Image (tube, rainbow, N blue to C red):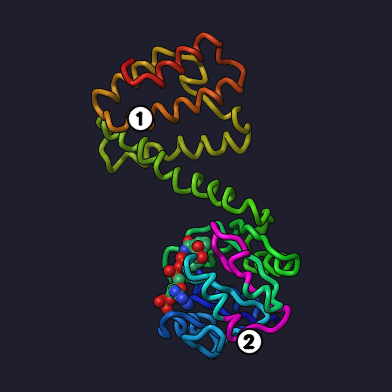
Amino acid sequence: MKKYAIVGCGRLGTALARYMADAGYSPAGFASRGLASAKRAAAVSGSDAPVSLLPWEVTPGADIVMITTPDGAIRETAEKIAEYQGVKKDTVVLHCSGAHASTELEALRRCGAKTGSLHPLQSFAAENVEKNPFVGIMAAVEGEPEAVKTARSLAENLGAGPFEIQTDKKMLYHASAVVASNYMVTLMNLALQLIIASGVPASRGFAILKPLVQGTLSNIERAGIPGALTGPIARGDVETVRDHISEISAKAPTRLELYRLIGKHTIEIAEARGDLTGEAAGELKKLLSEPDR
Ligand SMILES: NC(=O)c1ccc[n+]([C@@H]2O[C@H](COP(=O)([O-])OP(=O)(O)OC[C@H]3O[C@@H](n4cnc5c(N)ncnc54)[C@H](OP(=O)(O)O)[C@@H]3O)[C@@H](O)[C@H]2O)c1
């Protein structure tokens, strides 16, 4: 049975503490900036494994060390563990940052550890771990081959789907995740502000738009991009887009810049579909580029 240690017992570290134990890994110890967090992680793992403020006191007994401190503390934590020779040769050390690559763990690699990263594509909002948050999600893995192998099987044992990314392209992968998740929030905010400006009560806005958004996601899955694109830009309906701009300009002027910007990028997709004529595309480009039209 592989032994694991968690360093940084916050939202993700606590979930790992619980669900790695459930998946058959054996707790070797828990370290955090405060003892209360480390004790909570030990408790949810159902073990009496040691807890400490000093990571190198709990990591030597582990086959897998998960560093789940905030991103900014990963490198320094790895350097400290290395300084105190806190890992055995061939111990797999993984961090869980989406933006940073396994190169943050260079100090431990030099000590003989196998280093990698495992980024679960999930939002861990609280240390409440009643429901397994790993089931059905995807997890990006990268790093040294032995670390990738361990990270893959860990993800699978937790119920997630692992996929490999290139170490030197990790930042682009993370930018993609930010657009898919965070910018989706921004896009929904724009849609909600416009529907509220149209007179729909704020309390009903989301429920009204939700089936449309879900249908669009299904269409993207089924027909791909650009097959899923519908609406005035796809149809080359210049007059409707002109009317949108005029109404937004009058009733929600601070929203116009974003409407125009996304519209401009939507033209590219409509052109790729092949049913937007050159003339309509030209008109739409002008309309969406010129603030005074
Ligand atoms: N939350 C998410 O949705 C999510 C999703 C995917 C990946 N991640 C990644 O997971 C990692 C952890 O994120 P999180 O959201 O779980 O953060 P978090 O809730 O803030 O937890 C981080 C924990 O690290 C501890 N800590 C801080 N500095 C430390 C240090 N120098 N040494 C040891 N422990 C330290 C803190 O301890 P105390 O509580 O003891 O003060 C805190 O509990 C990050 O790399 C993040 O990018 C997070």
According to the picture, the residue beneath numbered tag 1 turns out to be: 257
User: Is 101 included in the stretch rendered in magenta?
Assistant: yes
User: Can the viewer see residue 10?
Assistant: no
Residue type, numbered disc 2: Pro
According to the picture, the residue beneath numbered tag 2 turns out to be: 60
* Mark 1 residue crowding within 10 angstroms, few (<14) / some (14–19) / many (20+): some
Name the image quarter holding the C terminus.
Answer: top left
Q: Which mark is residue 231?
A: none
Left or right, residue 153 beside residue 129: right
Badges 2 and 1: C-beta atoms under 8 Å apart? no
x 51%, y 15%: residue: 281
Q: Nearer the viewer, residue 126 or 186?
A: 186
> Looking at the picture, how far across and down is residue 211, in whole percent?
45, 38
Which contiguous range is marked in magenta? 81-106
Left or right, residue 250 beside residue 113: left
x 33%, y 39%: residue: 205
Sequence-wise, the earlier of marks 2 and 1 is 2
Q: Is residue 120 above or below residue 239?
A: below
Q: Secondary structure at mark 2?
A: loop
Q: Nearer the viewer, residue 194 or 85?
A: 85
x 48%, y 84%: residue: 43
User: Is 128 included in the stretch rendered in magenta?
Assistant: no
> Looking at the picture, how far across and down is residue 144, in whole percent?
72, 65
Residue type, numbered disc 1: Glu
> Looking at the picture, how far across and down is residue 44, in whole percent?
50, 80
x 73%, y 78%: residue: 90
> Looking at the picture, how far across and down is residue 130, in whole percent?
48, 71
